[in-house]
Image (tube, rainbow, N blue to C red):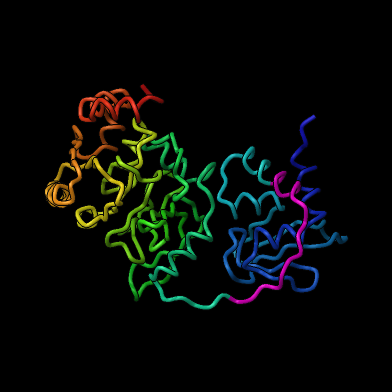
Amino acid sequence: MAESPHDLARRLADQAEAVCHHYLSSGRREGRYWLVGDARNTPGRSLYVRLKDSPKAPAGKWTDAATGEHGDLLDVIRESCGLIEFKDVADEARAFLSTPPEPRPRRTPQTPVPHGSPDAARRLFGMSKPIAGTLAALYLRKRGITDLRGTGHLRFHPRCYYRPDELSPTETWPAMIAAVTDLGGKITGAHRTWLDPRRLDKAPLDTPRRAMGDLLGNAVRFGTGGEVMAAGEGIETVLSVRQVLPCMPMLAALSAAHLAAVLFPDTLRRLYILRDDDPAGTSARDSLVERASAAGIEAIVISPRCGDFNEDLRTLGLDALRSRSRMQVSSQDVARFMALTA
């Protein structure tokens, strides 16, 4: 018989301190409580988790003094991991409970890193969670992107800092985090897309997308580059084409200027350029074709029917995007990369 939420919460409560160490690692134990900023693992002291049973409340119960929120350790797992469905929360809880306990080393404060630096980008990506079952996956699904194979460089952060300008207070919003890597696979930067959980869309901010770190020549990569790959500007643009060419390695350069300057792996022989239908996209296409030709790389331009390929996917549908891509991709690459969806 399936374990009830009450039983699962009780089992977590029996290991309350270990749960807090794992999911609320920004906090610390003080007496009979674990103190942290909130259930999403923000540093602070306003939320307190009871670590032992008492006449007032059982172990595992928590209250956020700043907001009045309260709950149990299942709620902690849901909020700290950014999960939506209870099944995913229960699966995560059971996975934690089935893992043998390990000695917990004493936490040492992290040394500060320069704001916006590659080190800050690596730290942000490391603090984020895989996107499966999170708001980031729901956001992509709403944009027609459902096949997320090979997207290990995408993650989700439930409370990512956003500051409109130097004179404004810092806000926190859920965000999709993308790792920017060099040709060797080293993370050199990160791209953040802040999200609105109510509308499953980009957050209502002046700049809901921002990048940090060293971007020039680097990109968000999907799949391992070889003799053939595709390159485009935006993450959603590239992932849209990947819905019909799921086995083709691709990269998102994050802007037209960076697409024009993206570096080629030594193994590359044919490059598909996923252009956006605007003046910046046209300029990037021309520059990239010229650079690829000079390097002895065959450059093939794939053009959308609408403004970009995500707009094609959402307005025309998957079959229309597949048909249009089939006409623009060489026949040998159709057989090689489109076989799983043809």
Outermost residue, right side: 55
Q: Is residue 93 above or below residue 177?
A: above
Going by the image, does 192 lie left or right of 38?
left
Q: Is residue 267 left or right of residue 328?
A: right
Q: Which residue is painted at 62% across and 59% down in the image?
A: 39
User: Percent position (x, y) of residue 111?
Assistant: 53, 78
Q: Is residue 18 left or right of residue 118?
A: right
Could you tell me which residue is drawn at 48 percent across and 51 percent down? 155
Percent across and percent down for residue 120 are 44, 69
Depth check, front residue: 110 or 331: 331
Q: Give the magenta range.
A: 93-109
Q: Nearer the viewer, residue 116 or 291?
A: 291
Quarter of the image with the C terminus in it: top left
Residue at image location 38% in from the left, 34% down from the top: 246
Q: Main secondary structure of the magenta part?
A: loop
Q: Quadrant of residue 241?
A: top left
Whole-percent x, y for residue 205 in the image: 34, 57
Taking 226 as reference, is 338 above or below it?
above
With 206 as the anchor, is 112 left or right in this view? right
Viewer-closest of 105 and 41: 105
